[in-house]
Image (cartoon, coloured by chain):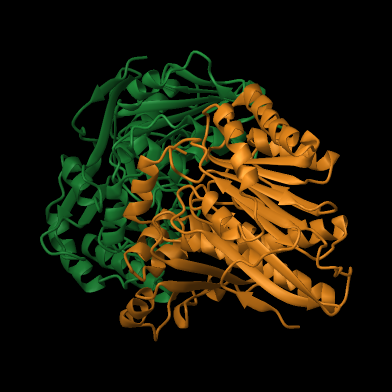
Chain colours: A orange, B green
Amino acid sequence: MRIEDLMEPLIVAGVRLGVVCAGIRYPNRRDLVVVELAAGTQAAAVFTRNAFCAAPVTVARAHLAAANPRYLLINTGNANAGTGRQGLIDAEASCRALAEQTDRQPEEVLPFSTGVIGEPLPLSRLVAGLPSALAALRPDGWADAAAGIMTTDTRSKSASRRLTLAGREVTVTGIAKGAGMIRPDMATMLAFVATDAAVDPVLLQQILVEAVAGSFNAITVDGDTSTNDACLLLATGQSGASVPPVGDDHSCFTTAVGEVCVELAQAIIRDGEGATKFITVLVEGGQDVAECRQVAYTIAHSPLIKTAFFACDPNWGRILAAVGRSGLDDLDLERVTIHLDEIGIVRNGGRAPDYTEEQGQSVMARPEITIRVGLGRGEAVARIWTTDLSFDYVRINAEYRT
Amino acid sequence: MRIEDLMEPLIVAGVRLGVVCAGIRYPNRRDLVVVELAAGTQAAAVFTRNAFCAAPVTVARAHLAAANPRYLLINTGNANAGTGRQGLIDAEASCRALAEQTDRQPEEVLPFSTGVIGEPLPLSRLVAGLPSALAALRPDGWADAAAGIMTTDTRSKSASRRLTLAGREVTVTGIAKGAGMIRPDMATMLAFVATDAAVDPVLLQQILVEAVAGSFNAITVDGDTSTNDACLLLATGQSGASVPPVGDDHSCFTTAVGEVCVELAQAIIRDGEGATKFITVLVEGGQDVAECRQVAYTIAHSPLIKTAFFACDPNWGRILAAVGRSGLDDLDLERVTIHLDEIGIVRNGGRAPDYTEEQGQSVMARPEITIRVGLGRGEAVARIWTTDLSFDYVRINAEYRT
């Protein structure tokens, strides 16, 4: 299996992207992205499980059930969430406007919005921006689109992999946005991954769900699941190569999709609001994955642990307290171990005898740190990624109106 | 029913308190408190449910099962948590030292510790402080004891109520400490409430559990349940009045105990680390209390909501998103309502038509605000108290080693 990891987002045959400044919320800011998909493109999608899902999520779900998508219509600056019935009418109207200009059916357009919650969608400005977005469509528009979907993000996020399937070159490229309100319950706020391989739609959904479980569903900044999360996997089939349901080519393709999703998910954490540290929480030795994730998220959401990491303080007592309150039945404290990177700090329910504060300090100085917890009661493992909690997180969220 | 609310902590016949600077962690800081209880005092207690409970919690539980307590031995500066076997040995040794100096059995001494986790208890300094703490015992030592148990607290916390039972005057006085690592799963870090009424021990435990449910178990600063939480209710019987198992006198007494616990619990929130706002989260119309509490804690732990309150930003979209992700099955969004104090902001799943940003701003300028959520699917109600999330929370927890 050979997969190339590319720095710049690669063109995907059958996909063109157009980006413009439509003045949705701020002037002179790229905030409207149209993605055109070739005929025959298959789509798989996962959406937020927040009960208050945004209007575009409801509309995109319905459209996906009715037709194969030919256009994605993405705006920033306004989430069209908490907007009630009018929000649904506006989301539908935006799809209808794009469909009319491209001679498609409204169901062939999927809407996505991100930005402030609870404000009416500025529909007329959005619609007014569509002709120039369509005029701007080009195959190498991925980098601009990655920039065009940013909100509080400080960096655009894209990833590409190239592989060979049955002698043909296949590309997987994805872009994502998100920096706060990040605890995706299936996907980050917005992520779009496309390939020019041909993939059966049932298989495509399965590949997406698996990739998301180990990437976008394994990150958290603040535990706040957004109302607008969406992740799409699009397969244009334009490379002429098909992904088989099993075998080496299947593995190679799913690995490439998984790698793109992990790279994008990690990029979201690296760009987490106010983040100064990239923290991997690895919980091993659980009875099942669910309890490993439960412990991992308890650690990842603890404000006390997150502020200690911000302060480069190897405050393992707070990690130990979080493991203790994570709600596991019959946890045997004597078997619990905690490592910071390669340094063992907790053994037998207390500080490891050979641990020194200097060792802890030296690990905490690193920009990327793994907290490894051993539960000593099974074989299951879970890994998630998170950030520290800094002054800047408070500043950004005290200033920004989501 | 007439209960007097007193500003200064009142003497409780049968209780004497002594406070000294023992140099547990810092010099010249009151960090050792001894509480002497008259013979015949009954005790009820609830402790942390953190699986990693501290050594003194384990020892206090065992001693309570073996004997009626005659002394409480409380130190700050060191939590004696995460200290393994040696921690238990040290906690036992501290009780033995006090028992020897007072001619009691070690089981008649209950140890309590709060402060840094994972450091060995400085036993010799603690023991060296005992003679002066015993020499300092006096009935009016409550205010000094309230100061002596503080860690990151900025204010000492005490409350008193006076009532009449069967023609006799009865007093209930309590002190508490706690400002961070506060999501008690039965009690705050440390709270001691005493009365000179006589109360049957089974009834006493029942009264404590009920009082704690509506006070210490209804607050959260950061969602981090401590390893050392403990709450005691002590009844010396020295007033000559007994609390009956039912009836008006019973109600009057349980109300007084409940009020003392609520006043102490609210004082902890008012003094929450970095707190600039006192926030009541009231969730109504749930199917049961558990789901109301689930929604309330999801709101109270959301960093996005907490930072918005710090910024005086009526960001109701974040509250709506938190209700949506709180995990309730079949929540009917159309029935959800959200108020900030008297201002209705969300109705029918979106912004209330008559709501204006000015109304929201005027509420957010207040130091005490109630977030009221109506679920519209039942009769159950839950109320909890919490703080905002400020720069100072991050500063305090980046600087302080718990």
Where is residue B339 drawn, in percent x and y?
48, 22
Where is residue A43 drawn, in percent x and y?
79, 52
Q: Which quadrant of the view contains residue A350?
A: bottom left
Considering depth in this image, is A371 or A194 the residue closer to the camera?
A: A194
Q: Quadrant of the N terminus of chain B?
A: top left
- A172 up-or-down from B204: above or below: below
Indicate left or right for A266 with B106 as reference. right
Q: Residue at x 61, y 44 (%)?
A: A133
Where is residue B125 drawn, in percent x and y?
19, 70
Considering depth in this image, is A177 or A395 the residue closer to the camera?
A: A177
Q: Quadrant of the C terminus of chain B?
A: bottom left
Q: Residue furthest bottom?
A: A354
- B213 up-or-down from A246: above or below: above
Where is residue B381 drawn, in percent x and y?
55, 26
- B59 up-or-down from B264: above or below: below
User: Is residue B44 visible from the viewing direction of this image?
Assistant: yes
